Amino acid sequence: MAYEFRDLRDFISALEKAGELKRIQVEVDPLLEVSEITDRVSKKLGPALLFENVKGSSVPLLINAFGSYRRMSLALGVQSVEEVGRRLEELLDMKPPEGLIDKLKLLPRLADLGSFIPKSVRSGPCQEVVRTDGFSLLDFPILQCWPEDAGRFITLPLVFSKNPETARRNCGMYRIQVFDERTTTMHWQTHKHGAQHEREARRLGVRRIEVAVAIGADPAVVFSAIAPLPDDLDEMMFAGFLRQKPVDMVPCKTVDLEVPAMAEIILEGHVDLDELRVEGPFGDHTGFYSLADRFPVFHVTCITQRSRPIYQTIIVGRPPQEDCYMGHAVERIFLPLIRKQLPEIIDMHMPFEGVFHNLVLVSIRKRYPGHARKVMNAIWGLGQAMFSKCILVLDEDTDLKNYQEVVWKVLNHIDPERDIQFTLGPVDSLDHASRLPNFGSKMGVDGTRKWPEEGFQRPWPPEIKMNPAVKDRVDRLWKDLGL
């Protein structure tokens, strides 16, 4: 299986061919109705939905495109997202060549690296129509997802900005509340790269940041916007790695930025750092409303688009939702990168109910006293993993996806006072339970078997397991038992 998507339309065709897409001709309202339909479909692992008759708009709406394990794998052109993780691991394993033969062997891999670099092009389908006047964001089927939302939100935007000091590009995904035909907020939370660009601009005395927002692109480009990459590593280069070919980037018409040439819709404009407006509430992926707060205002000064664009969006809320499968892909793809820094980790898993940052399960090959605590602290020091509210560390023989086994082992293995560790630090901006915005406590649980070297002097009992020979005999008898 190979990645063959030039744009969103190729992905839609592949979904339809795979029986993973349902076209909806019935008229539906973008205010709440699309969300209610999609929520019901996502809860029963239903298909991607292409709404072709959205009230108040002539633009079709695609949603739930990533909303299953199968569709997420299809989106990345693999049988399983673990394949991408293995490719990333191979890339990280590249070592300096020691001799001529090693150097010759390395040349094809170096050529592959060059093929990931985004390619600048002069024009693209995203600019078939250019409008600098007489346009309205409300021409698009932008959703109000939940009853208490403050209004309509663009929920799957690829937000392009530049670091004002280094001019390096960043692409992030920050929800956008629409106020009117051409004014929105820009919800880049304090820990995100967009907010870092804002801080750098303020430090340099810059009062305005140019921004471009792409809506609807090939799935590797969309997925790259949520990837937890290091600061100033170009997400479009990572998209090239996923696609195994470069992303064509076209200069915007009114701002000094490049955007994916094959995108459906582009919003060009600027964020005014001296203008803040109240944004939210918004029904978030935690399953609760995130609270209203003040964020910079994004002024849209130009819209470019395909002649007949498709609006791609997403709803978030109580899991499972479409974003759960995107988060699962992040977990599996970036696990090899975490293992490079923490080789004792056997596996890591974030249950959907933990909404990514609330619960992280880790199994380790324990080598020395206190090893579980070392792993907890190391994870809290890894990029966005710093938001992990609860980390449970278990022995290497634990199946982390078997929640019965995880709960059984953890609850049997801990002395709560001894084995639970608390720390203070940054927490996710959406954590409504933290004592202060963006700051609160986190908990680590050592659910491993305890060693004498850790002060445990009692015998540690073995697990109850039946003799394999008896199991084999009963297997042979089972049919005759009539049970």
Image (cartoon, rainbow, N blue to C red):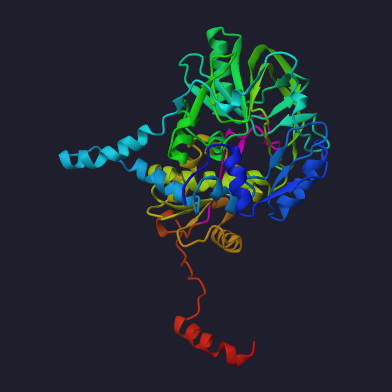
The answer to which of 137 and 450 lies nearer the viewer is 137
The picture places residue 152, in percent across and down from the top left corner, at 77, 30
Q: Which residue is drawn at the image coordinates 29% and 40% (left, top)?
A: 108
Magenta region, residue range: 420-447
The picture places residue 22, in percent across and down from the top left corner, at 71, 50
Residue 372 in sight in this render: yes
Spot the residue most to the left: 100
The answer to which of 334 and 411 lies nearer the viewer is 334
Q: Which residue is drawn at the image coordinates 38% and 34% (left, top)?
A: 115
Residue 192 in sight in this render: no
Spot the residue most to the top: 205
Q: Which residue is drawn at the image coordinates 67% and 29% (left, top)?
A: 437
Say left or right for 178 vs 420: right
Q: Which residue is drawn at the image coordinates 57% and 37% (left, top)?
A: 387
Q: As displayed, is residue 263 above or below residue 294?
A: below
The picture places residue 416, in percent across and down from the top left corner, at 59, 53
**Quadrant position of the C terminus in the picture:** bottom right
- Quarter holding residue 268: top right
The picture places residue 170, in percent across and down from the top left corner, at 52, 25
Say left or right for 111 vs 287: left
